[in-house]
Image (tube, rainbow, N blue to C red):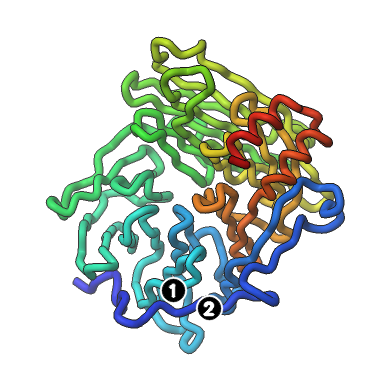
Amino acid sequence: MTPVLNGKVMDVPPVEIVCSGSSPTHSVDAVGEESARGPPITINELVQLAHIGIPNDQVTWSRVTMTSDKWISVRHDSRSDFSAKRAVVTVLSPIEGTISYAGSTSADSVLMNPVLPMIALKAGLRFEVFNLDTKELVNKVKFHELVTYWTWVNCDVIAMVTDSAVYHWKINPRDATSPPEQVFLRHNRLAFTEIVSYKGDPSLNWLALTGLTPEDERISGVTQLYNRNEDITQCISAHAVCFSSYHFPGNPYPSTVFCVSSREAQDHGKVHVIELGPYKTGNFAPRNCYDHLHFLDDMERYDFPVSLQISVDYGLLFVVTKYGYLYMCDMETAMCLCCTRVSVDVIFAAVLNTNSQGILAITRGGQVITVDLKKDGFISFLREQVKTAYRANRFEQVICQ
């Protein structure tokens, strides 16, 4: 059987990535007219994918994937031979500014492990996982159903979504052919939607599957929330969700938190912060708070949330929208603290920048950008613009320490 992946791994020194602009850390305060009055953030371009051989028409959601801030994996055609049957796989580290892997593949989709140097490849019904350091095949399986969406849920588990169910594939080097196991059935409200996200809490007890569908002149989002221990499922209106373990002040124990963002009627939306069970003795009553979001549209576009990221260190929830807007919310109250535009291009992938506690995002124009807080300026902004002295004092303690 022809291997899905061929190429050299770490046989040559990593290649430096050429960044656009006058320097790799070219910085602006905001995009467009909002820069004069927007919140104090910096927007740095780390990589321009065109400069490392990625054609702009192949910078798409299905070809460019980012499961964490460690790697971006790209499946693209060779510039020298666009008729080649095998595509090129490029794995790069945006923070370090290096290319970690380059090789050819017959796969139709590739995903890097969010933590470990392992790459997963899908070719039809075949799935293979390789260790890029040892160049060894770790796991492989031939699935029995067409997988319409797949992702790493954590560093050990790959989720596979079919038209009828969700499966988890445990990556186990000691059992290279272990099959995926069915976790739950898809709700009928997700029928005919395009699955765009699958998330799990740290224990993988709470799981959330999100699909989008065009409806009249808007995009509707539906999320199926499933609890494995109770075998209970519930559907909610949501375009983007995420889970986290978060320690609220005054509680002796951290809580499992479910964050939700949705676009509703006209230009209104909401962001929710929901504390999930089971209740932990000694903690305050579980909270369920929300705030309203105002979406900025024009006649030719319909904006909606595409990614939620939580900075546990700062107590901030970041809401990223398709058309480049960033909303920063307070994790403890869900209050929207500020909003600004960070990209004039469509954003189709975003993760937490664990180094800066900001956002790392990929735009349709091939930019990889990092959006970070100006710490002192952010506190001043809260005092002067939002006029929330208590929150400003609390954020000052955790952000400026």
The amino acid marked with disc number 1 is Ile
Q: Are marks 2 and 1 in contact (CB under 8 Å)?
A: yes
Q: Going 84% across and 50% down the picture, which residue do you hit? A: 299
Q: Going 51% across and 31% down the picture, which residue do you hit? A: 189
| Residue 20 place in picture, x, y as percent | 65, 75
The amino acid marked with disc number 2 is Ile
Q: Quadrant of the C terminus?
A: top right
Find residue 99 and name its label. Answer: 1
Q: Going 69% across and 50% down the picture, which residue do you hit? A: 374
| Mark 1 neighbour class, 10 Å CA radius: few under 14, some 14 to 19, many 20 or more | many
Q: In the image shown, does 98 or 201 lie closer to the viewer?
A: 98
| Residue 312 place in picture, x, y as percent | 52, 37
Find residue 52 and name its label. Answer: 2
Identify the element where label 1 is drawn.
strand
Q: CA distance from mark 2 to mark 1?
A: 9 Å
| Mark 2 neighbour class, 10 Å CA radius: few under 14, some 14 to 19, many 20 or more | some
- Relative side of 75 to 138, left or right: right
Q: In the image shown, does 149 or 137 lie closer to the viewer?
A: 137
- Relative side of 393 to 68, left or right: right
